[in-house]
Amino acid sequence: MAGYFELVDAPDGMYRIALRDGNGDILAMTTTFPTKQAAVRGISTVREIAGTALIKDRSHGQWSPSLERQVHRRHLHHTPAWRTHELRKAMSA
């Protein structure tokens, strides 16, 4: 179930990027960008950061090693949608 980026209008003629999951629910919303071109560059930056970003817990709860393992395990077992598509294509060939 692949998610997607959505360019949306922001106040004052600016733009925002919404990151949506496969059901269309918003996972994240960016700050504003002055142009569509800047917003598209922002998408590239988000893609680059999200693939390798560390987790910094600044919440009031305490981060535990078990949470770290859960995050790591989910990352290891996640197959990106583009990869799933490639695998299906290769198997049907």
Image (tube, helix red, strand yellow):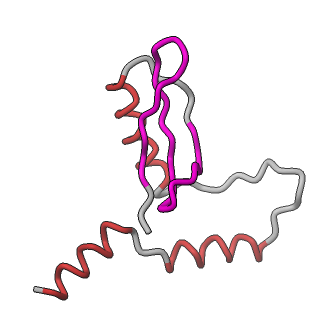
Quadrant of the rendered image containing residue 54: bottom right
Residue 82 appears left or right of 30? left
Tally the marks.
0
Residue beneath the point at 58% across and 75% down: 74
In the image, is residue 18 part of the stretch drawn in magenta?
A: yes
The residue shown at (51%, 51%) is: 20
As displayed, is residue 26 above or below residue 61? above
Residue drawn at point x = 46 percent, y = 57 percent: 51
Please tell me whether residue 13 belongs to the stretch shown in magenta: yes
Rendered image quadrant of residue 41: top left
Measured as percent of width and height from the top left, residue 50 is found at: 50, 53
Task: Report the residue that reaches farthest toward the top.
Answer: 12
For the N terminus, give its image quadrant.
Answer: bottom left
Instruction: Give percent across and percent down for residue 49.
Output: 48, 48
Residue 81 rendering spot, x and y as whole percentages: 36, 68
Residue positioned most to the front: 23
- Looking at the image, is 28 positioned above or below residue 52? above
Describe residue 60's horizontal placement relative to residue 10 as left or right: right
Residue at position x 68%, y 76% in the image = 69
| Location of residue 43 (image quadrant) | top left
The location of residue 45, given as percent across then percent down, is: 42, 40
Which of the pair 32/45 is nearer the observer? 32
- Quadrant of the drawing holding the C terminus: bottom left
| Bounds of the magenta segment | 4-29
38 horizontally vs 67: left or right: left
Give the dominant element type of the magenta stretch: helix, strand or loop: strand
